[in-house]
Image (cartoon, rainbow, N blue to C red):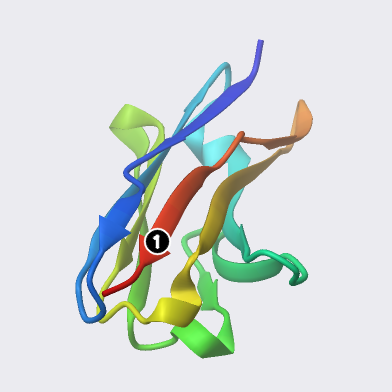
Amino acid sequence: QVQVVESGGGLVQPGGSLRLSCAASGTRFSDNNWGWYRQAPGKQREMVAVILSGGETNYGNSVKGRFTISGDSARNTVYLQMNNLKPEDTGGYSCYINNVHKGSYWGEGTQGTVSS
């Protein structure tokens, strides 16, 4: 009954912005740790941003200062604001949740492409 659905991907120019959303159902916001991960073709999946149930955040080194993760408990949704995008940010972005009662779940992902 737990579902994780991402949205907000697309094609942007270098220097542009995207805002990704991760909406979860079947869970309570405060019972989740949340994360965004990405994978480019031919590369390993990497952690982009994490927000814990207590509000602590962490970011991958390559996105620090450019990306911001935040949550809306009323909507049971976490966002990833991506600014000053670079071509190397291109990849499939997937949302992950770890629920204290129900375990871990992945969304199917949303594609972000940065190209001129």
Residue 40 % position (x, y) = 63, 66
Residue 114 % position (x, y) = 35, 69
Does residue 24 sit above or below 113 in this rendering? above
Q: Secondary structure at mark 1?
A: strand
Residue 104 % position (x, y) = 76, 37
Does residue 98 sit above or below 66 in this rendering? above
Quadrant housing the N terminus? top right
Q: Which quadrant of the structure image shows residue 19? A: bottom left
Extreme-front residue of the structure: 116
Does residue 105 sit above or below 66 in this rendering? above
Left or right, residue 36 beside residue 69: right
Please report the residue visible at 60 percent of the width from the left and 41 percent of the height from the top. Answer: 32
Quadrant housing the C terminus? bottom left
Left or right, residue 57 beside residue 65: right
Q: Which residue is mark 1?
A: 113
Please report the residue visible at 65 percent of the width from the left and 69 percent of the height from the top. Answer: 47
Residue 75 % position (x, y) = 31, 29
| Badge 1 density bin: few <14, some 14–19, many ≥20, Cα 10 Å | many
Q: Which quadrant of the structure image shows residue 112? A: bottom left
Closer to the camera, 18 or 22?
18
Please report the residue visible at 53 percent of the width from the left and 78 percent of the height from the top. Answer: 59
Specify whether residue 53 is in view: no
Extreme-top residue of the structure: 1
Specify whether residue 103 is in view: yes
Type of the residue with mark 1: Thr
